[in-house]
Image: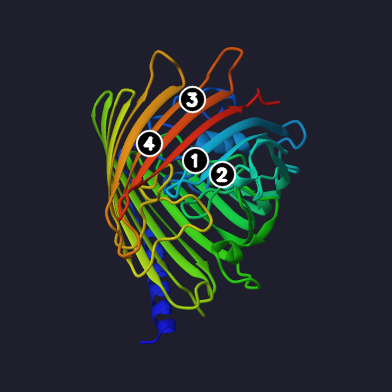
Amino acid sequence: MDAKATNSRRGTRATATLLMIAALPLAAAAQTTAPAADAPDDVYIEQEPSSTEQGQTPIDEAFAPRDRAQWVRETRRKAFQDTKWDLQARTFYLGREKYDDSESEAWALGGSVGFKTGYFRERFAFGATGYTSQKLYGPEDKDGTLLLKPGQEGYTVLGEVYGEFLINEDTRLSLGRRGIDTPYLNRNDARMTPNTFQAITLQGLYGGDEGRPEWRVGGGYFDEIKERNSDEFVSMATDAGAPDGIERGVYALGANFKAGDFSLGAIGYYSDDIIQIFYTEARYGIPLAEKLKLQFALQYSDQSSAGDDLLRGTDFSSDQWGAKAELSWGGALFTTAYTRAGGDTNMQNPWSGYPGYTSVQVEDFNRDGEDAWLLRAGYTFQSIKGASVYALYVDGSDPQSPTEYAKDEYDFNFQWAIADGFLKGLLMRLRYAHVRQEGLVETELNDVRLMVFYDPPKF
């Protein structure tokens, strides 16, 4: 069978699986209660402990806001009276000593300012967001932190300019440049500014209030991307690594169903002649006591070349599956996870943070033939509202390539989001990672990050 026929069959299989999962007539399981729909925007909501890495998007948080209450708050009906402005100031330091003893280091200052109107004639709204990142410190010989443009240059960009049409209370159509979050196509907001996309998207959030099951659906066409340290929009194919002159967009379609502590979702991405990706994830939680809960999750990703194989000039195929178990007890969360990558090449994440369960601060542990185990312990302090800490360890095996070697990574993270008082809206985060790589000569990498974000009261 030739490569094109193989790719076509893979694409058909992935699409059929996606549609089958999206159409499953799932019965309602245990119910949850959403926060009050009329809660004000600045209410501090204590979230359950989570092991989701910065820059990742679980599929049960894709396509729409975290819950029905936030969706309702965003559906503001009075055009000018309900216009909301959002302002955030950021400063970020990153220093990295690499495996080859070279260094990357920068300190940047910037942030964002944007607005979104209410709905004109209860149907149409528009918004825009500008971003900036300016150099406070950044030697030219220590480039590569992604806090600044290549060459350690500051930048300013109008990253979002969009119109939004309210088709009904549960469905929105968006056209223009804006951020969006799905597992393989998202903001990846782990530096000074996020990814944003030039796209047309349809998103829906159905149910999820008064204990009802929830459906999230989304789809669209993504033509260009502004990477997180860039002030230019480029073709999605170019960003994926295609040769110069090849321009292709990405079609995406997915859905997620959630009822109580059960969740199941899938999403497919297709870029003609470039790459096709299928991702699915299931989660289930078992309450054991008032403050004790056991949660399980499974994920699977499949990637392959598409059409005329323009990305690499040849066909390729790779996949990864993962499993995760979590035990939450009050403010503590204990996590263990395992992933296994296979195929004939490494897994890719051209337009987002990587969604794998063992993808952490520095390494993704998604190389062909690589197995990885993760152990993580986190705690949200009860005595210091908004403060949390976690530490983790990932052990990765030798990949298939004879020129690459096994790695392990240790991470530590402390975060404090001040919830009240005159410093409300201030977030401080300290992150440290140490990676050890085996080989003929053992090498190490150290990564230190200090972030301070400030969101003043909304107006």
Q: Say which residue label 2 marks.
A: 145
Write down the residue under mark 1.
Answer: 96
Q: Earlier in the sequence, mark 1 or mark 2?
A: 1
Q: Nearer the viewer, mark 4 or mark 3?
A: 4
Task: Find disc 3 in the rendering and name its residue.
Answer: 45
* Label 1 Cα neighbours within 10 Å, binned few <14 / some 14-19 / many ≥20: many
Q: Secondary structure at mark 3?
A: loop
Q: Is residue 336 left or right of residue 80?
A: left
- Mark 4 — residue? 411
Task: Judge from the rendering whether residue 326 lies leftward or rightward of residue 144; answer left or right.
Answer: left
Asked whether disc 1 touches disc 2, contact meaning CB atoms under 8 Å apart, the reply is: yes
Relative depth, front residue between 40 and 447: 447
Work out how far the residue at label 4 is from the one at label 3, CA to CA, in angstroms. Answer: 27 Å
The quadrant where residue 238 appears: bottom right
How far separated are the C-alphas under marks 3 and 1? 34 Å
Q: Earlier in the sequence, mark 2 or mark 4?
A: 2
Disc 2: CA contacts within 10 A as few (<14), some (14-19) or many (>=20):
many
Distance (Cα) linking label 1 and label 2? 8 Å
Crowding at mark 3 (Cα within 10 Å: few <14, some 14-19, many 20+)? few
At mark 2, the secondary structure is loop
